[in-house]
Amino acid sequence: SSSSSSSSSSVSPSREEAAKTQNGHNNTKTSSSSVSSSGAGSSSSSSCLKGARFSYMGGGGGPGSVLLTYSCQDRRIQIAQGDGMGDYVAVRTKYLSKQNRGNETNNNERNNNTSSPSETHSRQQQQQKCATTDSEDEDLFSEITRLIDSRRPSNIQDPAIRRLPFEFDGGVVGYIGYEVKSESLNEENAKESSRSSTWRERSTGSSSGSGSSSSNSKFGSAAEEWATQPDACVFVSDRTIVFDHQEQTCYLILIHPSNNNHNHNHNHNHQNNHTDRERVVKQRAESKGGGGPLERKETSLDVEEGEAWLKRAAATIWDLARPLCGGDGDDDFKGLNASSGGRRACRGSLSGQGGSSLENNSVKKRGALARWKHKEYVQRIKRCGDIITDGESYELCLTNQLRIEGESVKDPLDLYMLLRTSNPAPYAGFLSFRGKFFQNNEFCILSSSPERFIRINRNREVESKPIKGTRPRGRNQIEDDAIVQDLKGSEKDFAENLMIVDLTRNDLGRVCIPGSVRVPKLMHVETYATVHQLVSTVTGVVGPAANPSDVVRAAFPPGSMTGAPKRRSTEVLATLEGGRRGIYSGCIGFFGFGGAVDLNVVIRTIIWTPDMMTIGTGGAIVHMSDPEEEHAEMLLKTRAIFNALELYDRHTNTQQRKIKMEKNNKNKNAVVIDNTVSRISAPLLLQK
């Protein structure tokens, strides 16, 4: 690391085969993450049951971490600094101005329809100039760029860092919720927008009684209460563990401040270090106001803690991996491979538990409350058909929300481990936002998403993989093959997918080099534990004037969650759905310090809070849609989640029975025989 800058990164591979702890322990402090991501050069395949090549675990709250939360309603950004003890201290609050880059860009796009080619070219040049100067601080995406720039390590371009096989070399991790569309699309307030009603309603003077939140305040207000989390929340992950499942290797990444005059002979005693930490935290808490990046105050304790973490994490991973190999010596690791040991036994036991063969859906059994029940949802599907017939939209992605009340899940990490094992997905992720900073608004995100929103690699190549078209898995291989062929030949699903592919091509074309946008895979079927999906791949090369945040802004929200055209579809859907989607339909992932980005689409996801869980689901509506079939597809997409919840209930009930039997059994040597799902140390093992 360079001593001439204010921050640096350290990458340390732990002992070779420690990647066997793929299901390892996540400390789940104030903000932590476990994100799966496909590696460089990977491509979609017909079967996605093996998951991704790389898994990432990271944490915030360290001395080099910063947390950013955003509220769309008042455009409020709150910045918090890691206190070095696993939590955050609020530093300042900032309000963005009402005029943003999107407003100017969108106005120019509207004017382009009547401009000459020379005027259009001149306007585009002016637009690019404004995008990098005047409007730098005026939306969430620019604030994320500023945060990355202010924390980027000086040695991020070193050859040793560039040679890493994975893209995430430290950076910003978190989520951007669906409501941030107000930033990327520059939406007006729904109450003031003259476009909140459809053409049919304006011409007849009527209102949409089945969809408007104002005409159905009961559902509108209930939906508002469900999405209580910040509209966006990202943090600098200053400590990260990367698992390479292909090469059976584990890496540790540390981002820490560096000091020009730092002496590595640390002679501070514990009392002095503790006082030093309290002083730094106090200074950070008092440094409110101002719009520039946070000033990084480094102490010898920061470096000491970072170096100690590298050693501590490597030792922990080593200790966790050793029992899986059946021995204590170093030689036991040499013969370890992906097809041997506890990993294979884990999946075999899960199949025996019936993880993928549970009943079709457990919505009623779990007592889930739907925002729109069957009749109401079908009415909205029919309303979408009328809107499409009237020419307001070509395709509308109508969504619903399910809510499970009560403290049915004590440990969300346990549930996520079951979800990722029973329904492996290449873009799965677990984010935990808990601790003193979040106080009474703690929440976790448990995602088993099969859809990639945006990926940008180090060569500035961008990829998006929209999904449109879903079928359930068959009972055997013959049924599976027949279902796949039906999906490939479906005119309706082809139309759904093709319209979103065109929308994605348009989104990427705004920030990519002209002529670089391609569709290398069109209508490719991917198979998961419970469904077959029709997936297309759109690629391009990011232009020199655009940064990663510009790309995400241009494509947000994901077209597969809106419909086409995007702006008008979101306006209509806001009226029909009667409430906020929240985190659902947004994206989860990372913005790397080295320029890489990998974001999923938030589908097949649970939003957990201590007193309830919410699950978003939906589907695309086109002119050929059958309301009953669309309702059935909407429920089908929740099957994997409810399968995991049923497994969790089995696990919980089994553990409770086991504890009760052990208490009642006077013979200490008695053996309790039962099918259990046990959490042993850090990994989650399913065993007899």
Image (cartoon, grey):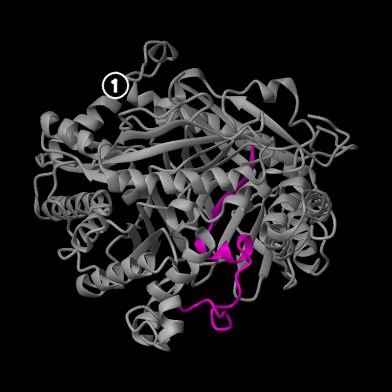
Q: Nearer the viewer, residue 556 or 394?
A: 394
Compared across the picture, whether 556 is left or right of 616 comes to right
Residue 532's place in the image compared with 204, above or below, is: above
Q: Picture coordinates of residue 96 (x, y %)?
A: 73, 69
Q: Tell me where residue 232 sits by quadrant.
A: bottom right
Q: Nearer the viewer, residue 79 or 391?
A: 391
Q: Picture coordinates of residue 304 (x, y %)?
A: 71, 39
Dot 1 crowding, Cα within 10 Å, few <14, some 14–19, many 20+? some
Residue 39's place in the image compared with 153, above or below, is: above
Residue at (30%, 27%) from the top-left corner? Answer: 343
Q: Is residue 184 magenta?
A: yes
Residue at (29%, 21%) from the top-left corner? Answer: 341
Q: Nearer the viewer, residue 312 or 252?
A: 252
Residue 524 can be seen in this image: yes
Q: Which residue is mark 1?
A: 341
Compared across the picture, whether 646 is left or right of 340 comes to left
Residue 198 can be seen in this image: no
Tag 1's secondary structure? loop
Q: Picture coordinates of residue 352 (x, y %)?
A: 13, 35
Residue 440's place in the image compared with 676, above or below, is: below
Q: Tell me where residue 672 sits by quadrant.
A: top left
Amino acid type at circle 1 is: Gly
Residue 62's place in the image compared with 474, above or below, is: below
The magenta span reads: 170-198
Figure quadrant of the N terminus: top right
Q: Nearer the viewer, residue 214 or 647?
A: 214
Figure quadrant of the C terminus: top left
Q: Is residue 108 magenta?
A: no
